Every structure is written in structure tokens, then in C-alpha cells.
């Protein structure tokens, strides 16, 4: 079957013929891939700055934001049926399980020996068919079929917003989101749905398609945000966004970093004197 993969021998993005997967044991589910999203992580992988091919392979099938339709399941699987719509979890727990993986918090894996389909050491879903263990699949309602491909990035966003609320000592009222990609727009929606006044900032000019999407998500769109914010979610990936985020953080504010990977100078005295929190967040719990 066809797959889209990164070829690590000559650093190219290729269409590749890969073996069709099939049910080989208990607890498994075979599904047809309906849609796959593309995000900044895929772009980082495709620029070959980070290389995590599965053991023994010189290629990685891309794709981790997936929705599929179940074709068959092993006889012992009861919670998933043929025709169900499923979204795979990206991360596979380490084995033997660390304390976090052992309690279904693979997103907090402390051994670092996890794999992630389409990202770290395991092939992804840019294929026609896939097999996963039922425990790694989430059944989603048919009613959300047309946007179910956003469930995985939304899970990342929901974890980040949950962390921000837990870390804030009061009642956050104003939020700033940096970045107008899927994760930024979903963050704006999630924060607006919780009643916060949300500002979204990005490089695109006002009136651009992404600015309009931000406004449709319930945020005001500003290229140069002013004022201070109780919750700031960084989903832009650029060091400049991290600096803007730190400067916009209000007293007792919480900044959750989702995208920036390069080092950025952090004003420690500001964090101390204003009781601020800067947190990182990755992946999501089942
Ligand atoms: C995915 C996460 C994953 C992270 C780091 C993101 O794009 O949505 O599930 O944990 O990349 O690999």
C-alpha cells in the first residue's frame, strides 16, 4: 500500500510502497485512514533536524493526527466495532512501564523510552490502512466526522489549558494566544469557551484568512498585543513569540509553551517578583 515517508538515506520526502498491516493477535483493530493532519512537528521532521526512525529502518512514515474508520477487530475486542470512527493516541507507553506510563499518563513518561507514531521511533498514519491496539484508539462520534482530524491537536490544547488553570492561583480573565495554526486557533476556542477574553496574535495581517478564523473562534486578532494577560499559550514555534509571551504575562500569570524549541532568555527576576509560571506541555493523556 502507498505511504508518505521521510527517507533518511538521502533526506528526501518520498511516496513509498509499504506492507499492508493485518490483525496478528489479541486486542487489535484494523482501520482505513480517512484523514491525516499536518502540523509544525511534521515540518520539523521533514526538515531533517530531528531524526527518529523506527529501529532497523532508514525511513519514517509520517502522520500522527489521524482519523480512521474501523474495518475489523480481533475477536476479544468489545469496545470498538466495524464502522466506528477512531482517533489514535500518538504516544505508546514505555515498557516496562515507568510510574506515569503505568497509570495511563504516557504523556508524562519519565523514562523517555516512549515511541510516537509518525514522530518518534514508530511509523505513522500517512498510509491507506493501519493496525493499532484497541487501548491506543479513541472512538469519536460520527457527528464530528468532518473535523475529527482535529481531535489529536485538540487533546494537546486541552491538556495545556487544563495545566494553565491548575497553575493559576486566581480566576483568570484575559488570555493571549500566540500563533494562528490549528493549535493556536483551537487554544483560542478552548479559552473563549471557558469565558476568557481572548486575544490571538500572529504574523499574518489583520483581515487575512487566519485572522478571520481567529475572530470566528471568539478571539480579537492583534498583530501587536498590548496589556497583560493571566493565561498565555504559545503555539507559534518561534523564539520571538516566546519573548512576546514573557513580556505580555501579567501578575500571577501562567505561560504554557507548546511550540518553541530554541533557547530563549527568561527574565527570572520578573517571574519571581510577579509570581509568574512558565510551563511546558506535550502530548495528552488518553
Ligand atoms: C503531537 C503530540 C506529540 C508532540 C511531540 C505534536 O505534534 O501532536 O502528540 O507528543 O508533537 O512529538
Image (tube, rainbow, N blue to C red):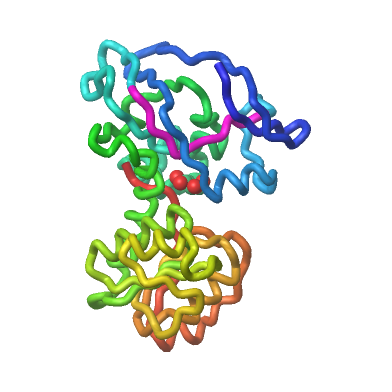
Quadrant in which residue 5 is drawn:
top right
Instruction: Give the residues in magenta.
Output: 59-69
Q: Determine the residue positioned at 51% across, 81% down.
A: 268
Quadrant in which residue 190 is drawn:
bottom left
| Percent of width and height locating residue 280 | 46, 61
Quadrant in which residue 169 is drawn:
bottom left
Horizontal relation, residue 14 to residue 266: left or right? right
- Image quadrant holding the C terminus, namely top left
| Percent of width and height locating residue 52 | 62, 38
Considering depth in this image, is 55 or 190 the residue closer to the camera? Answer: 190
Queried whether the magenta region covers residue 244, the answer comes back as no
Horizontal relation, residue 234 to residue 69: left or right? right
Considering depth in this image, is 227 or 215 the residue closer to the camera? Answer: 215
Residue placed farthest to the right in the image? 10
| Percent of width and height locating residue 140 | 27, 35
Q: Determine the residue positioned at 42% across, 21% down.
A: 131
Residue 41 in view = yes
Query: How many numbered discs?
Result: 0
Residue placed farthest to the front in the image? 207
Q: Determine the residue positioned at 64% across, 26% down.
A: 15
Position of residue 194 relative to residue 78, above or below, is below
Residue 257 in view = no
- Image quadrant holding the N terminus, namely top right
| Percent of width and height locating residue 14 | 67, 29
Queried whether the magenta region covers residue 65, the answer comes back as yes
Q: Would you say the magenta stretch is mainly helix, strand or loop?
A: strand
Q: Determine the residue positioned at 35% across, 48% down.
A: 155
Position of residue 187 relative to residue 29, above or below, is below
Amino acid at each position: 500500500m502507498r505511504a508518505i515517508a521521510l527517507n533518511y538515506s538521502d533526506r528526501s520526502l518520498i511516496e513509498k510502497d509499504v506492507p499492508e498491516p493485518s490483525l496478528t493477535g489479541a486486542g487489535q483493530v484494523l482501520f482505513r485512514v480517512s484523514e491525516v493532519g499536518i502540523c509544525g512537528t511534521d515540518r520539523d521532521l521533514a526538515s531533517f533536524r530531528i531524526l527518529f526512525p523506527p529501529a532497523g529502518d532508514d525511513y519514517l512514515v509520517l502522520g500522527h493526527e489521524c482519523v480512521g474508520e474501523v474495518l475489523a477487530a480481533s475477536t476479544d475486542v468489545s469496545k470498538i466495532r466495524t464502522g466506528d470512527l477512531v482517533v489514535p493516541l500518538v504516544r505508546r507507553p514505555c515498557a516496562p512501564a515507568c510510574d506515569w506510563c503505568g497509570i495511563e499518563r504516557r504523556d508524562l513518561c519519565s523514562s523517555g523510552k516512549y515511541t510516537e507514531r509518525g514522530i518518534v521511533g514508530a511509523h505513522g498514519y500517512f498510509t491507506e490502512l493501519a493496525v493499532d491496539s484497541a487501548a491506543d484508539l479513541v472512538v469519536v462520534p460520527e457527528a464530528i466526522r468532518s473535523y475529527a482530524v482535529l481531535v489529536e491537536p485538540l487533546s494537546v490544547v486541552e491538556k495545556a489549558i487544563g495545566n494553565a488553570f491548575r497553575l493559576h492561583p486566581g480566576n483568570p480573565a484575559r488570555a493571549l494566544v500566540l500563533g494562528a495554526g490549528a493549535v493556536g486557533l483551537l487554544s483560542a476556542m478552548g479559552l473563549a469557551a471557558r469565558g476568557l477574553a481572548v486575544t490571538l496574535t500572529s504574523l499574518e495581517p489583520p483581515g487575512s484568512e487566519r485572522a478571520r478564523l481567529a475572530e470566528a473562534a471568539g478571539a480579537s486578532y492583534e498583530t501587536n498585543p498590548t496589556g497583560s494577560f493571566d493565561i498565555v499559550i504559545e503555539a507559534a514555534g518561534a523564539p520571538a513569540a516566546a519573548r512576546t509571551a514573557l513580556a505580555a504575562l501579567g501578575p500571577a500569570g501562567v505561560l504554557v509553551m507548546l511550540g518553541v524549541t530554541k533557547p530563549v532568555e527568561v527574565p527570572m527576576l520578573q517571574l519571581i517578583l510577579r509570581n509568574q509560571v512558565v510551563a511546558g506541555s506535550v502530548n495528552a493523556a488518553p
